Amino acid sequence: MRILKYTYYIILVNLLLISCGGGSDNDTPVDPIVPVVLDPDAASLIFPEDNTECNEGVVSTSDETKSTVTFEWSAAENTDSYEIKLKNLDTGSVTTAVSNTNEKDISINRGTPYEWYVISLANGTSTSATSDTWSFYNQGPGIENYAPFPAIAISPQRGSTVSSSSTTIILEWTTSDVDDDIVSYEILFDTSETPTVSLGETIESTIEATIASGNTYYWKVITKDSFDNSSISELFEFRIE
């Protein structure tokens, strides 16, 4: 009987040691649980609408050249905050605003073209998501007809290197106009960073240019409308291998 009691005692002690973490030095440590942070989704822009005139801004009482516009976009999944990027297409200057909701009041110049997009951000990750880019004109006092939006290069892509055995290349661009009255495009094209050589005017959104291997080319698009308004694009460049 004593032997049985002694054996039972040893088994009980071993069970207690195991349950309390004592005993073996080969116990596998438990890794801490790391929370999973999901990447944010891209927002969808709502207002100001693309390629339109924004006429809902509140004009400043202290400066009539400015108005406050409420920018709106859809709430994005897995997102804690947003960065609103707003570019003045006349000056090229970019303004950044931050919001924890899906709207933001921003004071901007009247009678001025802008483009904007929204970046979705999430705490705990450096990954972000970017919305589409939209353009609009902020309504100005006494403006009956707006200049076209500055053209955007499609091909060759800005900063690209092109492999070509041809002596010519097709330049392609896109643009829009609130009043829908664009009448022509003039293309400035040269190896100079300030191109002054005109390839002529066209009503199409493409034009052929002569090229040579090893050169870097720079070009701009001047867009004109029926009221003699015009806009000049940013400088585009590409290199020929």
Image (cartoon, grey):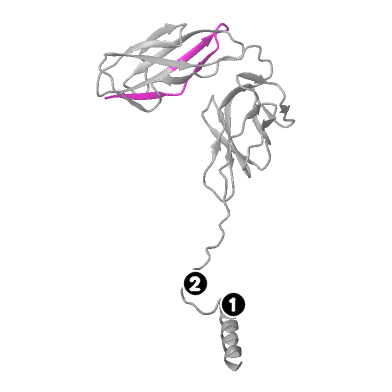
Q: Is residue 193 visible?
A: no
- Determine the secondary structure under disc 2: loop
What residue range appears in magenta? 221-241
Above or below, 45 relative to 181: below
Whole-percent x, y for residue 148 in the image:
55, 15
Using the image as rendered, state which of residue 10 and residue 190 is in the foreground.
10
Characterize the magenta stretch by its predominant secondary structure.
Answer: strand
In this rendering, would 217 be left or right of 35?
A: left
Task: Farthest residue to the front: give it.
Answer: 1
Whole-percent x, y for residue 174 in the image:
49, 16
- Determine the secondary structure under disc 1: loop
Above or below, 219 relative to 118: above
Q: Which residue is label 2 attached to?
A: 27
| Residue depicted at 35% across the width and 24% down the height | 238
Whole-percent x, y for residue 80 in the image:
63, 45
Q: Which residue is label 1 attached to?
A: 20
Q: Earlier in the sequence, mark 1 or mark 2?
A: 1
* Mark 2 nearby-residue class (10 Å; few <14, some 14–19, many ≥20): few
